[in-house]
Image (tube, grey):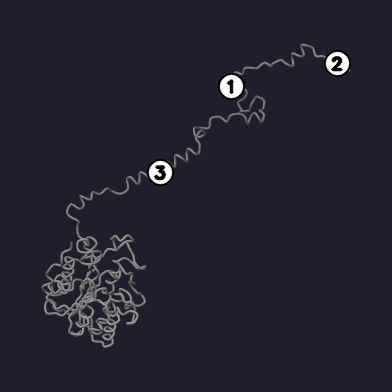
Amino acid sequence: MKNQHLSPDTSKQFHKIPDLDIIDLDQEDDLGAMGSDESGDSLLPDESPESAERKPRGNQGVFSHINIHIVLLAVFLLFVAGIIYKIATFGVHIDLDEIFADGPGEYNDTYDTILPLLDKSNNPVYMDFSEGSTILAFGNAPFADDRNSEDNLVNLMRQETGATIYNCSISGSYLAALRTERDMETAPQDIFHPYWLCQVAAHNQSACDDYLKALEILGDDAPPEAKEVYDTLQSIRLEEVDAIVLMYDASDYLAGHVMINPADATDITTFTGGTEAVIEYLQFYYSNVRLIVMSPTYAYAIDDNGDYISSDMKRYGGQDVLSTYAILQYASCVSRSVTFVDNIYNTITEDNAEKYLSDNIHLNPEGRKKVAERFAYALNYYNEASRNSSPPAQD
């Protein structure tokens, strides 16, 4: 074969840089306008698919430049700002100085239920208890504290009423017993329950024997006034008693004793059952005796650090707060038409407890005086003179 040699001119053609045409965009626009006829058909050659894909889509509006994350962030910030605004402007500002300008006001809610004595036919029996009446007082610390002092609660009640009141209270006793039946071997302290004390007062021989047996078993652990109470109950005749007042403090609440047994209203191992058992016994055997039940006064609970806290904030033994004990006792009295004196909301309350308690539960002399006034008010409520008088003032 012959060797083919490229001429210099030919070689230059291979290395020659092609000329670049400068495109006039304005001219293209004109050509674009000319390339379409009136019917809208293009007069220019068809564009290839590749060039069509590369062709810019044109301006799609301002939203084409907004990132979705920016939108979500703006919505979130608006939501947070709305919450902050609601919190900052929630409620109405109240000036406490303006509210209490005339003093702290009065708390008028009360569970007081003052009822007359009822006979066996449930007809009211009005009696004048103002003077010369005989009353038994069953309870624990409120009646038992400072037993022989002038400012003992029972002594103050005597002064307020002029009645003969026998103090049959037992310190350290409860309104909820340990056993449903007397068992001096396992629960000798149960004999000091008011249900059994009523039977001792009725000279029930079995109850009297168990009382003496309990004193023997307890020995030095027996309450110091226990023998004195026994002798007092033996010296009276229950049918000659005009009234019995029952008042137990918050000890059952602090001990976590069961409040109520829905299946047995007179279960004496519960707080309300102990109350109703006494009511039922007296109404059945001694319907001539008027019963006045006084609720516990307010008492403080004690937290794990030994500090006093509201008894509406702490529960013991899986039970409820102190006010629930008092309200359930009120319900028991109302259901059996018995006078109920509301001490927890109308005598020694959470608002004034610091003034009238010597510790978290015991009454000081001023507190005892207030309770004595409330008892006299309830006792004489149906006397002609008392009807025209005002109830004891609240703090």
The quarter of the image holding the N terminus is top right
Residue at image point 80% right, 14% down = 6
Q: Amino acid at mark 1?
A: Asp
Q: Residues within 10 Å of mark 2 (few under 14, many from 20)?
A: few
The furthest residue to the top: 8
> Which residue is denoted by mark 3 in the rendering?
80
Secondary structure state at the residue bearing disc 3: helix
Circle 2/circle 1 CB separation < 8 Å: no
> Which residue is denoted by mark 2 in the rendering?
3
Q: In the rendered structure, which disc, 3 or 1, sits on the residue that comes first in sequence? A: 1
Of residues 305 and 17, the one drawn nearer to the viewer in this rendering = 305
Q: Amino acid at mark 3?
A: Val
Q: Amino acid at mark 2?
A: Asn
Which is more foreground, mark 3 or mark 1?
A: 3
- Which image quarter: residue 210? bottom left
> Which residue is denoted by mark 1 in the rendering?
29
Q: In the rendered structure, which disc, 3 or 2, sits on the residue that comes first in sequence? A: 2
Tell me if residue 141 comes above or below residue 32 in the rendering.
below
